[in-house]
Image (cartoon, rainbow, N blue to C red):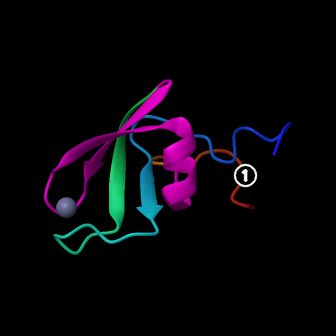
Amino acid sequence: MPGKFFRYQYAEGDIVTMKKQHPCGSKQWEVLSAESEIRFKCCGCGHIAALSRAAAEKATVAVKPSEPKGSPAE
Ligand SMILES: [Zn+2]
């Protein structure tokens, strides 16, 4: 789908909910770094994984910013 590249904004400290559950039972991952590759740490077991941005976007259900700021409206 040309023209629509970034579905999600990833930033350090964000909590990302993934489609697939990790073997430890957690679906939530903390963003460690967001560059051409996104590095995640599993919130359940601390496992670290790196995904390309495209793969990360496919696997992501929701991104929750670590510090909500600005307007409370979505
Ligand atoms: Zn885990």
Disc 1 element = loop
* Residue holding disc 1: 71
What residue is rendered at 69% in x and 47% in y? 7
Crowding at mark 1 (Cα within 10 Å: few <14, some 14-19, many 20+): few
- When asked about the image quadrant of residue 37, the answer is top left
Q: What's the amino acid at mark 1?
A: Ser
Q: Residue furthest front?
A: 1
Task: Left or right? Give the position of 53 relative to 31.
Answer: right
- Whether 40 is among the magenta residues is yes
Where does residue 25 sit, x and y in percent of width and height? 22, 75
Q: Is residue 64 above or below residue 50?
A: below
Q: Residue at left 34%, top 55%?
A: 29
Q: Residue at x 73, y 61 (%)?
A: 74
In magenta segment, residue 10: no
Seen in the picture, residue 15 relative to 5 is either above or below; the reply is: below
Q: Which residues make up the magenta segment?
A: 35-64
Residue 12 in picture, x, y percent from top left: 42, 34
Residue at the far top in the pictured view: 35
Residue 63 in view (yes/no): no
